[in-house]
Amino acid sequence: MATLTEREEIERYQKLLEDWKPAPPSKKWKTQPVTSGPARPAPAAPAAPTNGQLLRQPGAILKLGDGPVVIYLRPVPQKEYHLVLALFPNGSIKTQGVALDAYPVEELGAIPPVWLERMQQEMRWNRDLIVFHCYSYDDVRKLPDAMGAPADAPPAARTPVPSPKAQPEAPAARPPDDPQPAPPRRGSRLQIRFGNNVWDAIYWGKDDQGHVVAHQTNNQWALMHLDLDRFGNGVQVDPNPDLALVEQIEKSLLAQ
């Protein structure tokens, strides 16, 4: 074998280095900045609710703008409205179809399913129940007042009945010596006497279990059932309800 000179040895190593030198990257792998094409889409705005979509949980207490307070039930399939229970000042309830998208809706609270089912069966609403399930006491004043007369329910039409002919007139009934007092209203102060004791309470209402009164113990208000009839004449009722005290009791009950 011929011996390579020093110069030939150097040239040989240079050629080997050239053969092993990595080739430049191919153009197809070269990263190019994107200078054209559609811009990245912005986050889409919330889509309008589709027909039959559940907007609220059943039992949600909703205030429809300047309109009524309703209890949400469910959407109506293939329709643009939802079924709600409208609350009327006389304590009655009416099922209505309402397009909620047409109103600014404010959710005041929510009632449990068991009470919602009961309201639908009785078609009556109890203000205490709604008050207890409001999120904030400030929203209580937005509820209709069920204490007043049914202003929105006109009296039923009465058909005049002709009196029979040749009937002698009955003598006028003598008014009782002790007329029955007017029934107590929420906020009426009660003084209940039993034996030598006198107990003060605030009348609150009546349900299927009887009368409900509010009493204060250790500077805290609470509600309880009390059979007022068994005290007879031992119950004295202030005919003028204290509405400011009613508001104070409601606020105390909600804070518990």
Image: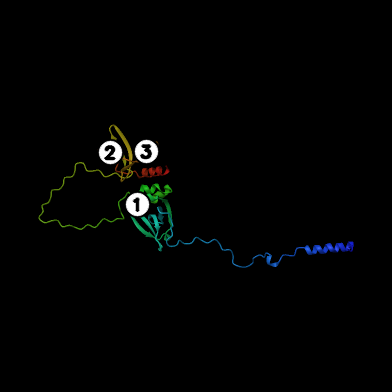
| Sequence-first disc among 3 and 1 | 1
Numbered mark located on residue 119 in the image: 1
Q: Amino acid at mark 2?
A: Val
Mark 1: secondary structure? helix
Q: Position of residue 77 (x, y in %)?
A: 40, 62
Q: Position of residue 150 (x, y in %)?
A: 30, 53
CB atoms of marks 1 and 2 within 8 Å: no
Residue of label 3: 216
User: Quick one: label 3, few (<14), some, or many (20+) residues within 10 Å?
Assistant: few
Spatial distance from mark 2 to mark 3, Cα to Cα?
18 Å
| Sequence-first disc among 2 and 3 | 3
Can residue 228 be seen in this snapshot? yes
Q: Residue at x 36, y 52 (%)?
A: 117
Q: Position of residue 116 (x, y in %)?
A: 37, 51
Mark 2: secondary structure? strand
Spatial distance from mark 1 to mark 2, Cα to Cα?
32 Å
Mark 3: secondary structure? strand
Residue of label 2: 235
Q: Residue at x 42, y 51 (%)?
A: 108
